[in-house]
Amino acid sequence: MSDLEGTMMSELHAPARTRFAPSPTGYLHLGGLRTALFAWLWARHTNGQFILRIEDTDQNRYQEDSLDDLMRGLRWLGLEWDEGPEAGGPVGPYIQSRRREIYQRYVQQLIDDGYAYRSYMSAEELDALREEQRARGDAPGYDRRDRYLTPEQIAAYEAEGRPSVVRFSAPLEGKTTVHDLIRGDITVENESVRDPVILKSDGLPTYHLAVVVDDHLMGVTDVLRGEEWISSTPLHQMLYAAFDWDAPRFIHLPVILDPSGQGKMSKRKKVVDGHEYLAQVHEFIDAGYLPEAVFNLLTNVGWNFDAEREIFTREEAIERFDVADINPSPGALPYAKLEWLNGVYIRDMAPAELQARLIPYLSRGLDIAESDLAQDPRLPLLVPLIQERLKTLAEAAEKVEWAFQSADEIDYSNTKALLGKKLDAAQSADVLATGYDLIENAEPFTADVLEQAFRAKTDELGLKAGSFFSPFRGALTGKMVAPPLFDSMVVLGRDETLIRVRNGEAALRKAALETT
RNA sequence: GGCGCAUUCGUCUAGGGGUCUAGGAUACUGCCCUCUCAAGGCAGAGACACGGGUUCGAAUCCCGUAUGCGCUACCA
């Protein structure tokens, strides 16, 4: 084989069937999204399929609006599933609570083959057992007592009507080695697998049974999941062996840590260094992060697109992604980098596109109907002014608020905003009075004409632009920081600009009187 | 406690025995540009957890320690 062929072979992968299998017990958070992203990337890279499967076997923790949030989050990032809820597919249903009979059939098969048994201990008895073990200093865990029940004892329990669970008969000695694609071989003592429950007393399976049965039945070839599952992978492999099925490839992804780097990112809002950090996907959406930026960022946590290049398209990521290159060590979500990335994508966007995406956020922030905003002639003028100043979509409202306020809503209580650099209140008021005439006479009323007139006057007065321009920014917006001045005047129009300059001057005259 | 996984600038990462006086990005600092803020340009500071091996040579391989995380449920 030539080198070229060798290279090509190593880059050619058989189509992988991957799945994202969340539990509808809460809202999708960024760690889950990243797991889904990697599974999706791998399926797309190999030209395989990406499956969404809902693992709702815990009825107690089920949360009604969770599934909706899950699907919305995945779609927001552009992770369409080939099979799953709403998409359908040949190996459904894709919601585990609707597969109850399937699991029961396979559990019965395990019992019949001697790989599983019924256990009649109640939850309370189990708790008491663990308590005892802890008191003795033993490792807590089921002691396998019901594994050796006689037919008579079983009959007695059944006659009593005692509820039961089904436990897996784990091998009592030897070791089990599982292979993780990015971590290598992981070996545990079989004895440490203490006959876990595989079918609960409510007739639904536990995760361990359901995941093995479903991954097998659904033809999943590559299991990408969080590293919290490493410990139970030997059990899963035992189950595959008991069923006489081939196990899929296991790829355990590193967890995403919270910003302190100490501990898994919480689903709930947490405070680190006095700052609340975002964790749930819907929070990132609300805050105005772009899916492009989040996609880019998440792809680069635990995997790396390129040593020297930070920005890439989704297609490029698909082309290069390889599970073999995943970094096994956990990492914190780099929030500051997300801010930067979001700004990069905002700046790269066509202004019309940005405007469209901004409307829902502006509507919320300014309390103006989306339909009104869509027709507002000021918006196409404003968007280019704030485009390179935006880190998130949500902060746009605060940057353009002045344009949507009436003149008397502008707040001049912060006199500092009206002061020219190195000028006092009276001098700044004079500046505004001087500029008033320039604005009145600018013809046509464009940013260029205004700027030329202002600069000429600045030179004539022997002032610096910082001194002459600043009072106008304050008069127009009431703020220290605002979009470029002359463009802002054009947005307001000549009449409104003149009113605000007058108002600003009045506020300054008043302030000048008070200080002297 | 037991078992497992991990450990390169503050953070995300490149690197997989010599090309490493360890590369990129972000954040930070300074300078430039500049009507404010941004954006942009330039420069700077900043890391192989520790200790033993193996080797002519280790950030890279092995062992130990430390630290962090995970699992140890009729939760996933």
Image (cartoon, coloured by chain):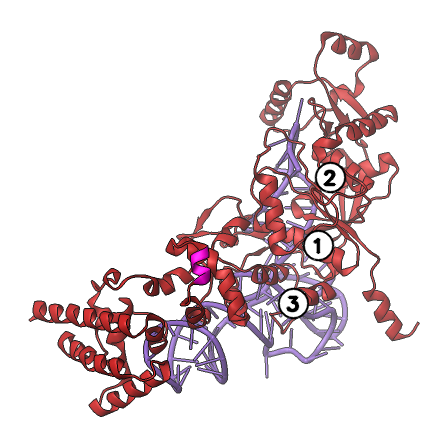
Distance CA(mark 3)–CA(mark 2): 30 Å
Residues marked 3 and 2, same chain:
yes
The x, y position of residue A408, in whole percent, is: 23, 62
Look at label 3 and name its amino acid: Thr
The first of marks 3 and 1 along the sequence is: 1
Helix, strand or loop at mark 2: loop
Residue A2 vertical placement versus B10 (above, below): below
Look at label 1 and name its amino acid: Trp
Helix, strand or loop at mark 1: helix
Magenta residues: mostly which secondary structure? Answer: helix
Name the image quarter holding residue A231: top right
Residue shown at 8% from the left, 70% from the top: A513
Which residue is under mark 1?
A40
Which residue is under mark 2?
A94
Start and end of the magenta stretch? A371-375
Palette colour of chain B: purple
Residue shown at 26% from the left, 75% from the top: A472
Between B32 and A361, the one nearer to me in the picture: A361
Between B20 and A504, the one nearer to me in the picture: A504
The quadrant of the picture occupied by the N terminus of chain A is: bottom right
Distance CA(mark 3)–CA(mark 1): 15 Å
The x, y position of residue A156, in whole percent, is: 76, 8
**Is residue A422 something that shows in the picture?**
no
Which residue is under mark 3?
A313
Task: Please give left or right for residue A326 compared with residue A291 in the image.
Answer: right
Palette colour of chain A: red
Distance CA(mark 1)–CA(mark 2): 17 Å
